[in-house]
Structure formats: structure tokens, C-alpha cells
Image: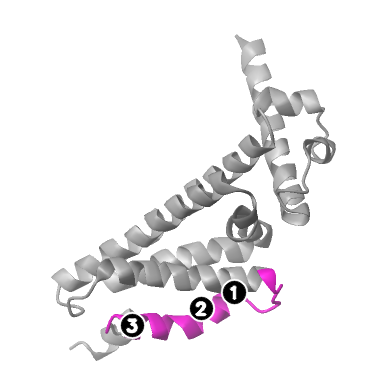
């Protein structure tokens, strides 16, 4: 029993090395110019070892995307659980995405930039992810309308706009290789988002409540 478990542990460790190396290669080379040979070299793995875990470059890239999405979902769920105010929840969801990418510029490049030039499969997957995250924002805005925190509005469009604005901000930060902190740029965006739905910043609302 110990031998199969040891083999499984080694296989998982090798798969992790492959994915970590692939992230570096895709981020530096771009999807189209990246090669299985270079991923194998950077992960200290043979090409055969790569194909044992993944059928090809596309599968590696999709696995990285899905792993990133899962990480973001977990961060968003944890952030939402910390707040009761629906506007604060929407703000926290955006901040969870932003903080994740702020710590991992290579991950941000993979997620926000490389997918756009990697082909229809990846573009379709990213469209699904964007819609999922925009829906998370929409749900919080729906709750804000139900509670009378904001006036009725098209929350679907607003959710797309909020996540789209954050997506644009992160993409710009990656493409232009801006040295400034990503968190600081969001400070300028937040008031615009709040005004777009007629909301008061949750922290400001807390100060004026009796």
C-alpha cells in the first residue's frame, strides 16, 4: 500500500512542477510561442512525462485556467462571508480578484491577456468565467435593491460593467507593466462604481448611520 501512495505523491509533485513551469513559460512566451519541449525543460521533466499527465499544450493551459478560476472562487466566497451589507459584498468580491492578481502578475497575464490570443476554446471559456463572476456581482446588487440600499436598476448590466471595469484595470496594469500597486488603482475606480448604481461606499454609510 505504501508504494502506490508514494508513487501517487511523486506523480502529483511532478504534475505540480509541470503546471508551475507552464505558467512561467506561457507568461513569458505567450500561448502560441510556448512549447511542450520548453515546459518539459523548465519542469525538469521529459516530454513523455508531460504527456503522461496532459494530452498536450492546450490541456495544460486549460488546467491552469481552471485552477485559477477555482482559486478566485474560493477567495471570493471567503470575502463574501465576511460581510452582511450587499454593497460591501460586491466590493469585497472585486477586491478578492484584485488582491489575487496583484500578488501574482504572471497569473494575471495568463488569465487576462494570453487567453485572448490562444484561440476560440480559451476565449469561450473566458467568456463563461466573466459571466460567472459578473453574476456574483449582480446577485449582490439584486440584494441591495431588495433591501432598499439602492434604487431599482438593471443589475445584470451593472454586474457586467463592474467586473468589466475591474478586468480592464487589471489588463492595463499587466500589458503596460505598470510599477504602481494594483490596489491603489482600484481606490480611484471604487467611487465610480458606487456612483454608477447610486450607492454610498459601505464605510461611508456606516459613519453616517445613527
Q: CA distance from mark 2 to mark 1?
A: 7 Å
The residue depicted at 61 percent of the width and 48 percent of the height is 119
Q: Which residue is mark 1?
A: 182
Quarter-wise, where is residue 90 in the image? bottom left
Q: Position of residue 7 (x, y in %)?
A: 68, 18
Looking at the picture, tell me which residue is in the foreground, 32 or 158. Answer: 32
From which residue to which does the magenta span run?
Answer: 175-198
Q: Give SS at disc 3.
A: helix
What is the crowding at mark 1: few (fewer than 14 residues within 10 Å), some, or many (at least 20)? some
Q: Which mark is residue 142?
A: none
Task: Specify whether 37 is left or right of 69.
Answer: right
Assess whether mark 1 and mark 3 are in contact (beta carbons under 8 angstroms): no
Extreme residue in the front direction:
120
* Circle 1 SS class: helix
Task: Say whether residue 187 is magenta.
Answer: yes
**Quick check: 19 above or below 131?**
above
Contact between labelled residues 2 and 3, with CB atoms less than 8 Å apart: no
Left or right? Give the position of 37 relative to 113.
right
Q: Residue at x 65, y 24 (%)?
A: 9
Q: Name which residue lies at 58% across and 60% down.
A: 112
Q: CA distance from mark 3 to mark 1?
A: 21 Å
The answer to which of marks 3 and 1 sits earlier in the sequence is: 1
Are there few (<14), some (14-19), or many (20+) residues within 10 Å of tag 2? some
Q: Which mark is residue 196?
A: 3
Front-most of residues 179 and 48: 48
Residue 203 visible? The answer is no
Are discs 2 and 1 less than 8 Å apart at CB?
yes
Q: Nearer the viewer, mark 3 or mark 2?
A: 3
**Which residue in the structure is indicated by mark 2?**
186
Amino acid at each position: 500500500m505504501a508504494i502506490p501512495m508514494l508513487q501517487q505523491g511523486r506523480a502529483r509533485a511532478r504534475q505540480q512542477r509541470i503546471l508551475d513551469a507552464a505558467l512561467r513559460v506561457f507568461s513569458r512566451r505567450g500561448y502560441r510561442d510556448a512549447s511542450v519541449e520548453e515546459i518539459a525543460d523548465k519542469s525538469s521533466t521529459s516530454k513523455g512525462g508531460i504527456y503522461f499527465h496532459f494530452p498536450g499544450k492546450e490541456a495544460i493551459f486549460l488546467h491552469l485556467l481552471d485552477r485559477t478560476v477555482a482559486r478566485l472562487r474560493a477567495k471570493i466566497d471567503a470575502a463574501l462571508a465576511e460581510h452582511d451589507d450587499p454593497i460591501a459584498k460586491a466590493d469585497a468580491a472585486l477586491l478578492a480578484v484584485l488582491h489575487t492578481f496583484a500578488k501574482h502578475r504572471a497569473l494575471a497575464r495568463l488569465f487576462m491577456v494570453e487567453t485572448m490570443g490562444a484561440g476560440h476554446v480559451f476565449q469561450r471559456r473566458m467568456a463563461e468565467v466573466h459571466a460567472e463572476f459578473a453574476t456574483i456581482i449582480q446577485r449582490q446588487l439584486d440584494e441591495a435593491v431588495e433591501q432598499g440600499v439602492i434604487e431599482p436598476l438593471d443589475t445584470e448590466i451593472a454586474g457586467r460593467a463592474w467586473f468589466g471595469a475591474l478586468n480592464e484595470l487589471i489588463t492595463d496594469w499587466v500589458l503596460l507593466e505598470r510599477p504602481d500597486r494594483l490596489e491603489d488603482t482600484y481606490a480611484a475606480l471604487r467611487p465610480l462604481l458606487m456612483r454608477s448604481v447610486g450607492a454610498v461606499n459601505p464605510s461611508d454609510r456606516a459613519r453616517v448611520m445613527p
